[in-house]
Amino acid sequence: MESPLLLAAADGPGGTIRLSPEGLEALRALPAPLHVVAALGPPGGGSVFLMNQLAGAGCAFSVRYFPSLSSYAQAVPRHLRLLEEDAEDEHRLLHFILPPFVWSLCSTALAPEDENVLKAVDHKLEPALGSPPGPVTRCILTLFPEQKLFHVSDSNAEGLSRLCTYLLGCGPKTAPGGAWVGGAYLAALAERVVDAMQGDAVLRIGQLCGEAKEVAQQESGDRWQDDTNHWSDGTNFWQDDTFLESGDTSDATPQHDDIPQNSASSQHDDTDGDTTLQQEGAAWVEPPSPQPLSPMPAPVCLVYNSDSNKLSLNHTALAVLRAITQPLVVVAIAGPYRTGKSFLMNRLAEHRTGFPLGPTVQAETKGIWMWCLPHPRQPGVALVLLDTEGLADPNKGDNNNDAWIFTLALLFSSTLVYNSMHTIDQKALDELRLVTELTDYIRVRVEDANSAVEFNRIFPGFVWTVRDFTLQLQEGKRPLTEDEYLDKALSLKPGSGRKVQEYNELRRCLRDFFPCRKLFVLERPTADSNLARLEEIQEDELQPGFRKQSNAFCQYIWENAQVKVLPGGRQVTGTVLASLAEKYVATITKGEVPCVESTVTAVAQAENTAAVAAAVSEYRQGMEQDLVLPMDSRTALVDVHRHWERRAVALFLSRAFADNDRRYQCQLMQELEAAKEEFCRRNEEASEKRCRMVLQELWQDVKDSMEKGNYTAPGGAQLFQEDLGAVLDAYQWWPEKGVKADAVLEEFLRENEPLAQMLHATDAHLVMMERQREAEAAKEAAAREAEVARLKEQQRSLEEHSRQLEQRLREDQRLQLKELDRMLEHRLKEQRALLEEGYKRDAEALQLQIKQLQEEKRK
């Protein structure tokens, strides 16, 4: 097509819609599949420009077709409806019919931090707008299956690039049920919609789509929907790169393939065709995979630290975390101020810039800053980097505030990096003195006394980086490894005097709290003259030794830093970490000591409640999608129920944790059972309505005969009997009546029994009574069968839930045993080290912890 064609226009403001024959003819010639992008908005909003960008070079839409907003906006109907009878469910049903909704903000200035939030949440509308949503936003979130927000302006070429890439990556247009459609279907649908808009009634989308499908099949045979083998879902035809500044390939603005492709076309994979049958026979359904993480373009502040040293959370950062459903590897760095922590974290992020660096003695980082990235070594895992405010800043002079910052870094992270300068001497250890005070800032359990074993369960792995290191790693003439150097620095002195106890206290705390320790020494990164411009220098300007050492550090973190887990082995996602952060900071700001056990319990309750709600929502949406009411039998409905019940339980188990008493699983079972009964009730109502309509239609001829007096003439009784038999026979063979066919027939016969008596048609009356008895017997038999089926289904559902929970409990037990083995191994290693160093008493004291762990493992 060389240029755009007019498809529809209004006859003046507020006038009727007319279709262009030329546009319809061109549309009918297009085979399936079709990607259909519609743009609308106020005049001057940039929709014409956007469509021209999508069309590419050589094509242009003209504004002359759209002289004013009223020429097309006033003709849009006020209401859409899928079904005639159940208006309260229309929003949920339309959710499966309407396309993705994309909001493009054109020529609107946004603050840089708002641009960063858009990218961080993958342009999702709900987290970008914040909470609570207004009525318009709620309507959009309810009606449309996917909602996106993009910013396009003269100063934001990347925004236009992302918008076009997303639009051209969406799935093809589908009919209700998921089949791809061609131009013949769309042309037929357009004609029927325009015809329906001539009246004041709402548009019956289901009816209109069905009529369009029939017309398209008649006109085009089977070509209205194309063979899916001839289409590649992953194809992106937008190759225009004119929006990128020439030569702009720096690390500061890396290009990522982070736009989801063909999300719409994949929505039906789990529910169509043979897939459903395969999953029906499975005992376990895998939970839905987390969405791929889009890299944050720059860090954001997670924990504010005000000038008065009051801690608070950044809700924008929390929104970013809540959008991450993947497990997290959380790496936090802490240490004295102005020691190069931010520079080291930027290298972990594989960027020159990101966490701010400063060339002066003034501290640059305040509070805790966060950077969420896809993990470079573990697919499906997110890497969260936390850069913390430097300790012992003389301009702040608040050791208590330092302790809280350090405490939060410990509680948030799965690996803690402690960064210091020059060497590990007594001064460096004294700067870590707050480790000995951690028991004053953290409680592990609500009631039991804190112990090293309990802290070891919740504390992260410990990595010490020593910067600007110039010493030789050797003892005498024997070379030392970095870890041997750390162990030597943490070795204990024999004796029991006060000075010896003070000397050993910090070292013993570090050994007890962090049995898994690692040391890296790094020389000065570059010449002194370059230190003020570290963000600008190239990789080859760094010292070769520093590059080698820092690369070894990064490789170790990427390959060995573990996914953060809660007590019990539950992996932490972004949603869970956001909840933990809220609980911990709220406790600290109230002047209380955070308790890990109570915090995890509170988060588990909230997450489990949300998991139940999400699972029930998944079940309801799936049932709404797959059920076509009325179903012929309760068994057919239960088959669909079983499929979506398994998916709902799998989703619940993928999110829930610490549900040891099965309270939330029981709640889920009750809600799923109630939802199933609701669908059964709706199925009965739909069946009853359909059966009444069928009988009303079949009985019309009998009513006409009565009005004509045919049954009051001689031989009328015989004629009535014959007509009644014809009605009942036709009703018996009428398809798709549903589960209430017998009950409705029985009621119908009972209502018309006086008619037979009134006509004195004794023989007809006897036939009527016999039919009524048969219908009543059939109804009772059906009720008995339904009750037996319901009881069997309840038993099967209970067994299914139990199987899945047992599998989940076995997995949790395996993770707990693995964690106990790890702790036991570290304790035994520590005991051997103490014995080798001659600290028999300390080794005997450690034996109690080892025995405690062994007993716990045997349990």
Image: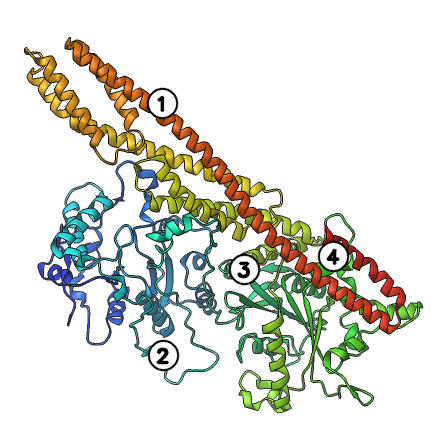
Residue that badge 2 annotates:
244
Q: For label 1, count other residues whose C-alpha is less than 10 Å away and answer few (under 14), some (14-19) or many (20+).
A: some
Labelled disc at residue 454: 4
Q: Secondary structure at mark 1?
A: helix
Q: Nearer the viewer, mark 1 or mark 4?
A: 1
Q: Secondary structure at mark 4?
A: helix
Locate the N terminus by quadrant.
bottom left
Label 3 vs 4, first from the N-terminus: 4
Q: Nearer the viewer, residue 830 or 733?
A: 733
Q: Residue at x 68, y 54 (%)?
A: 596
Q: Residue 248: x, y in percent?
A: 41, 82
Q: Nearer the viewer, residue 150 or 708?
A: 708
Kind of residue at badge 3: Gly
Residue that badge 1 annotates:
780
Kind of residue at badge 2: Leu
Residue 253: quarter of image: bottom left
Q: Nearer the viewer, residue 267 or 391?
A: 267
Q: CA distance from mark 3 to mark 2?
A: 32 Å
Residue that badge 3 annotates:
574
Q: CA distance from mark 4 to mark 2?
A: 53 Å
Q: CA distance from mark 1 to mark 2?
A: 73 Å
Q: Residue 775: x, y in percent?
A: 28, 22
Q: Is residue 92 visible?
A: no
Q: Nearer the viewer, mark 1 or mark 2?
A: 1
Task: Using residue 797 as the reference point, say whether residue 731 is left or right of it.
Answer: left
